[in-house]
Image (cartoon, helix red, strand yellow):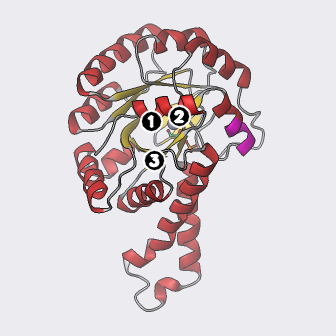
Amino acid sequence: MLVSAKEMLTKAKAGKYAVGQFNINNLEWTKAVLLTAQECNSPVILGVSEGAGKYMCGYNTVVGMVKGMLETLNITVPVALHLDHGSYEGALKAMEDGFSSVMFDGSHYAIEENIEKTKEIIRIAGEKGISVEAEVGAIGGEEDGVVGGGEVADPAECKQIADLGVTMLAAGIGNIHGVYPENWTGLNFDVLAQIQEKTGTMPLVLHGGTGIPEEMVKKAISLGVSKVNVNTECQLSFAAATRKYIEEGKDKQGKGFDPRKLLAPGTEAIKATVKEKMELFGSVGKA
Ligand code: G3H
Ligand code: ZN
């Protein structure tokens, strides 16, 4: 059964660990993340960007695929299906189609409009027991067509949004989507500490989880981050393993061209990356 992300994140915040959100793109991705979560006895959040949702033929198809896998793979750990960086319309549609969690990314609106739209999403989500993530400030870089300027969040605005009753709050603290540039100056822990102080028990979300040095991730978790989003890193692992398989000519051996064989090394690579992250975030054994 799909669950809202509320309970798993409340526990994570209290237990000072984080739950990973791993973005999915297709059947292999979904299977890899779910099997790893089960193996690690870890709660997990499956992230679906609007672009990935379209690629997978719509949110209803994604819901059907995930629910089917939960049953046939005997997944018993808590799993939330979460719309990542959703527009207002996208969040409404995902809720209608059966997602158990949504992010409404209103960070590009003026704060007043962000508040109004967030309130409406919270109202509808509340009726269905769906968790809601809001964003203040902006995550730098680009993810699946969503471009952010990297503005550092204002802790007072974070409190305003948190007080609306969102389940979790993403704040821009110098984090960037995709691979971090060499001249990246790191996360802004001063701002994170201020946000944590103002928002109390609210689970905070760290986007752009790919390539952040381990010590920084741990420090962010100690300062209230209870959810870390990872996307690019799984894509890089998948691509490298697939490339290796092809460069070694394995697709030309026997029935190595069979898509089920061709995609297997990449799928295993995603599993390894997800496991590594769950260990780093401290969510192993917390289901
Ligand atoms: O929303 C998803 C993420 O923030 C993932 O970022 O691709 O840098 O890991 P990433
Ligand atoms: Zn993100």
Label 2 within 8 A of ligand 1 by Cβ: no
Instruction: Work out whether mark 3 precedes mark 1 in sequence or the reverse, and give the earlier one.
Output: 1
Q: Position of residue 27 (x, y in %)?
A: 35, 60
Instruction: Say left or right for 93 vs 210.
Output: left
Residue under label 1: 8
> Which secondary structure, mark 3?
strand
Q: Is residue 265 above or below residue 34?
A: below
Residue under label 3: 23
Instruction: Say left or right for 87 vs 158.
Output: left
Crowding at mark 3 (Cα within 10 Å: few <14, some 14-19, many 20+) = many
Crowding at mark 1 (Cα within 10 Å: few <14, some 14-19, many 20+) = many
144 inside magenta stretch:
no
Residue under label 2: 12
Marks 1 and 2: CB-CB under 8 Å? yes
Q: Which residues are magenta?
A: 214-218
Instruction: Work out whether mark 2 precedes mark 3 in sequence or the reverse, and give the earlier one.
Output: 2
**Mark 1: amino acid:** Met
Q: Dividing the picture into quarters, in which one does residue 73 lie? A: bottom left
Instruction: Say left or right for 142 vs 118.
Output: right
Q: Position of residue 184 (x, y in %)?
A: 74, 37
- Of tags 3 and 1, the one toward the viewer is 1
**Mark 3: amino acid:** Asn
In the picture, which quadrant includes the C terminus?
A: top left
The residue depicted at 59 percent of the width and 83 percent of the height is: 248
Query: Alpha-carbon distance for marks 1 and 2?
Result: 6 Å
Query: Alpha-carbon distance for marks 2 and 3?
Result: 19 Å
Label 3 within 8 A of ligand 1 by Cβ: yes
- Residue 213 visible (yes or no): no
